[in-house]
């Protein structure tokens, strides 16, 4: 009987992996359809169907699916968001994730190419739409994630002594905004593409810190980063580039820093034997289907970049099981 239970456990685990896409499609269908906004107050399946002009049969099945994935509660034939859905899936919620989820949904077609990407080792020059709504979902999706992790960085790293930071490829500037709100002495420069800076300006203005912000538009691999910073923050950048590109970028950061300045690299950093964290291993495949040469990297690989650039005192810290920091200093 013990062996039979073990076989059941094993087959159940395989089934969970194989059918994971079904759960994500339940979530994406409800999110994109506006279901969670309607379920802030209890409603029947018929009421939801009428509001969205959907079929009653399909709507009832979808709502039951949301109960199955533990996002919605059901009582007396009425459905209502649970606290997770209310916080994460309704715009304005305390941890709203709508933009990053829509970005993940848009990766559906790219992930279907995984067999070919594994065979070739790259997505080559496969072009993606990085404009309009797709770009906005991605950049604001970074905000969805960063609104929590930026506070975690503040708990992990003492920024009290810094006055002039570069938020390199900082997207919506969520980290820099959070840091500035916590440290009145700090000023920030955001470096990113012009269309991204347009979105960031909205975020900075909404936070009321526009008088302490500068912007540089360009390509971080080619264009001037300016100089004189005492801290450069790099969040979730290195996974988009190759080993060689990252080594060159870290060298450029070294040159942009004032003596005694600090580089902080935040990413899904792997253990040196590449056995975990699990999220980072899967995210490497995400880079395989989306970038020509991106990957997730180990602590030793990042240490090599900073050591070879001239940084000293490199050290690691963990924010979450999947997100880690590497911090190093330019000699004074």
Image (cartoon, rainbow, N blue to C red):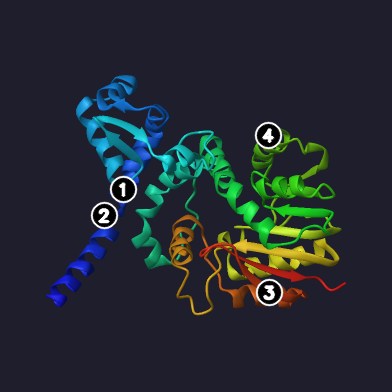
Sequence-wise, which precedes: disc 3 or disc 2?
A: 2
Marks 4 and 3, Cα distance to the nearest angstrom?
34 Å
Residue tagged 2: 19
Residue drawn at x 77%, y 39% as measured from the top left: 209
Marks 3 and 2, Cα distance to the nearest angstrom?
39 Å
The answer to whether residue 28 is left or right of residue 273 is left
Label 1 Cα crowd, 10 Å radius (few <14 / some 14-19 / many 20+): some
Secondary structure beneath label 2 = loop
Image coordinates of residue 166 in percent, x first then y, are: 76, 54
Tell me the quarter of the picture where residue 116 sits: bottom left
Tell me the quarter of the picture where residue 118 sits: bottom left
Sequence-wise, which precedes: disc 2 or disc 4?
A: 2
Image coordinates of residue 278 in percent, x first then y, are: 44, 67
Q: Can residue 252 be seen in this view?
A: no
Residue tagged 4: 202
Location of the C terminus by quadrant is: bottom right
- Using the image as rendered, state which of residue 169 and residue 203 is in the foreground: 203
Image marks 2 and 1: residues in contact by CB distance under 8 Å: yes
The residue furthest left is: 1
Marks 1 and 4, Cα distance to the nearest angstrom?
34 Å
Label 3 Cα crowd, 10 Å radius (few <14 / some 14-19 / many 20+): few
- Numbered disc in front, either 4 or 3: 3
Q: Is residue 82 above or below residue 271?
A: above
Point out which mark residue 315 bears: 3
- Numbered disc in front, either 1 or 4: 1
Image coordinates of residue 185 in percent, x first then y, are: 85, 49
The answer to whether residue 264 is left or right of residue 331 is left
Residue tagged 1: 23
Sequence-wise, which precedes: disc 1 or disc 4?
A: 1
């Amino acid at each position: 009987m013990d062996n039979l239970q073990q076989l059941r456990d094993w087959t159940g685990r395989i089934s969970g992996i194989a059918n994971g896409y079904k759960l994500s499609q339940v979530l994406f269908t409800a999110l994109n359809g506006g279901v969670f906004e309607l379920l802030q107050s209890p409603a029947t399946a018929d009421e939801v169907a009428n509001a969205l002009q959907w079929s009653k049969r399909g709507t009832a099945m979808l709502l039951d699916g949301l109960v199955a994935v533990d996002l919605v509660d059901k009582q007396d034939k009425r459905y209502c968001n649970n606290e997770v859905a209310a916080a994460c899936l309704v715009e304005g919620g305390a941890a709203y994730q709508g933009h990053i989820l829509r970005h993940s949904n848009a990766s559906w077609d790219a992930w279907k190419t995984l067999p070919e990407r594994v065979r070739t080792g790259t997505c080559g020059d496969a072009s993606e739409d990085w404009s309009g709504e797709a770009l906005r979902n991605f950049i604001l999706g970074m905000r969805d994630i960063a609104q929590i992790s930026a506070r975690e960085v503040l708990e992990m790293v003492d920024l009290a002594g810094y006055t002039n930071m570069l938020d390199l490829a900082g997207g919506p500037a969520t980290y820099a905004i959070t840091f500035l709100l916590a440290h009145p002495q700090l000023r920030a420069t955001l470096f990113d593409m012009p269309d991204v800076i347009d979105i960031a300006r909205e975020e900075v203005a909404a936070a009321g810190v526009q008088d302490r912000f500068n912007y540089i538009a360009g390509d971080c691999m080619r264009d001037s980063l300016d100089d004189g910073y005492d801290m450069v923050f790099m969040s979730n950048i290195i996974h988009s580039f190759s080993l060689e590109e990252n080594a060159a970028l870290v060298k450029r950061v070294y040159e942009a820093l004032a003596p005694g300045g600090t580089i902080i690299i935040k990413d899904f950093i792997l253990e040196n034997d590449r056995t975990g964290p699990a999220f980072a291993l899967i995210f490497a495949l995400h880079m395989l289907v989306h970038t020509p040469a991106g990957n997730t990297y180990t602590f030793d690989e990042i240490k090599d970049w900073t050591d070879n650039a001239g940084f000293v005192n490199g050290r690691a810290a963990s924010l979450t099981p999947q997100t880690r920091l590497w911090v190093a200093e330019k000699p004074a």
